[in-house]
Image (spheres, rainbow, N blue to C red):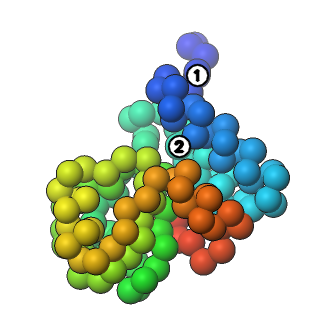
Amino acid sequence: MVKRTGPTNPYLRELISKLKEKSLELKAPIWRAVAEKLEKPRRKRIEVNLFKIEKNTNANDVVVVPGVVLGNGELSKPVTIAAWRFSTSAQEKIEKAGGRILTIEKLVEENPKGSKIKIVS
């Protein structure tokens, strides 16, 4: 059996280690949960469409997606979304709805304790 090595992308590996550090340092288990979801093999990585974010959020919510945000569906309310990556169409639709796009690192800087953040996966 082949030993699992985790993500090979150096930026993703760095992000995962930073999230684990912040989780311990700040006693914020949300960052540990996000790191564990990002560590999954590529075939099990999370892909979330905008219609799922629309369905599971209210206006002005803060959401973290431990994976990729895709542009299938519409977004009708302003939502702050942090993710590993965004498709071009998802970026356009989020900005059109008045939402904000953040990297996960930026969200950790803005809200280190992770309070009032939803994980959508």
Residue 44 horizontal/vertical position (percent) = 43, 40
Say what secondary structure mark 2 lies in: helix
- Left or right, 28 with respect to 86, comes to right
Query: What amino acid type is highlighted by mark number 2?
Result: Leu
Rendered image quadrant of residue 1: top right
Residue for point 47% across, 26% down: 9
Residue under circle 1? 4
Query: What amino acid type is highlighted by mark number 1?
Result: Arg
Residue 19 horizontal/vertical position (percent) = 66, 47
- Left or right, 71 with respect to 24, comes to left
Residue 44 higher or lower than 2, as above or below:
below
Residue for point 55% across, 61% down: 107
Q: Which mark is residue 16?
A: none
Q: Which one is in front, 16 or 92? A: 92
- Left or right, 6 with respect to 51, comes to right
- Left or right, 66 with respect to 28, comes to left
**Number of numbered tags placed on the structure image:** 2
Q: Which mark is residue 38?
A: 2
